[in-house]
Amino acid sequence: MILNTGARTDTVNYYAEWLLNRFREGYVLARNPLFPNKVTRYELCPDKIDAVLFCSKNYAPILTRLREITDAYRTYFHYTITAYGRDVEPNVPDIRTSMQTLIELSKIVGRKKIAWRYDPVLLTEKYTIARHLETFAYMAETLAPYIDRCIFSFVEMYKKLTVNMPELIALTESDKERLAEGLGGIAKKFGIRIQTCGTNGDYSCYGIRSSGCATLEILANANGCEFRERKHKGLREGCHCIESRDIGAYDTCLNGCKYCYANKDMAKVRENFKRHDPRSPLLLGNLLPTDEVTQGAQKSFLKSSFVQSSLFESD
């Protein structure tokens, strides 16, 4: 089973103590977002978890204790650093601080286990194509020695976004081509492997791959292991990732990003945060008498013949 810690919220940024407690105690409970009284239990012992996926905009809160996880589990880290300031990402550290934290993370886990996410790419009067390419080049030059690859995607124009970001300028196909050409050229200049995520367009002519951002191939190369061949179902249209189990919860991320799909409104997020108990097996609150807890299926994707020999080698 692939354990996902950061698809629904920025767990390591705001709930690091809780996450470390869950690994120490060896299990976690996850509430079904569609059926709140349905709760799934996952065992967190290393022989039940093929790999742990992380996604965050700030790993600083967990860096000093990260080895409590990385010394026992296969891991892969997505680190989102964009061109946007606090007008779009109110509670995210600035670019220089974020890049320094990524470098520190890379020194702990090795470059092969880190993907720099530059997404979503969106346009406003302030964040123009030219500004994206200028900022991306600045970051690429700094981060190239410390990352496995760069992943980007174009913003999805879902209904909530038109309310949260009225300043948004819809991307045309021409805009996407110009951005892809520029990003691909910059990545090539600095020797960065670049790919899309959740994007259906073909930009291979610019050196941009379209594979999933969390595939068994990526996890195997990062951790020196072997997985069985398995179809990657993905999470949505255009996604080519391997299936994973998320232990987070929606409406809990305090980053406050205007483009966020995981929060309905920040007032609800702040109320939910008050319900968080680092000692609880659930991210929010505790078990209720009406809750129905079931054991989650945790089938391994690893090849049965794989012998763990050098699991935690890093560059």
Image (tube, rainbow, N blue to C red):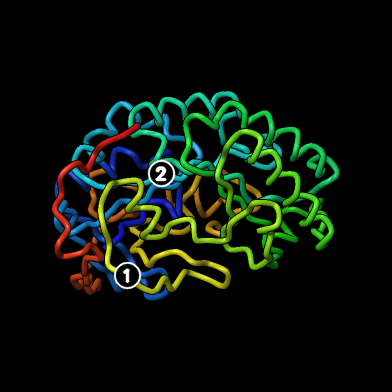
Q: Say the numbered circle drawn on residue 77.
A: 2
Q: Split into 4 quadrants, where in the image is the C terminus?
A: top left
SS assignment at label 2: strand
Asked where in the image residue 126 lies, by quadrant, the reply is: top right
Identify which residue is drawn at 27% across, 62% down: 227
**Residue 37 visible to an observer of this rendering:** yes
Residue 97 pos. (x, y %): 55, 24
Count of marks placed on residues: 2
Quarter of the image for residue 309 reads top left
Q: Position of residue 301 (x, y in %)?
A: 25, 65
Residue at x 29%, y 45% (from the top left corner): 19
Check disc 1 and give the amino acid type: Glu
**Disc 1, SS:** loop
Q: Which mark is residue 229?
A: 1
**With 18 as the anchor, is 126 left or right in this view?**
right
The residue mark sitting in front, 2 or 1, is: 1
- Mark 1 crowd level (few <14, some 14–19, many ≥20, 10 Å Cα): few
Q: Nearer the viewer, residue 288 or 313?
A: 313
Please name the residue shown 59% across and 24% down the image: 96
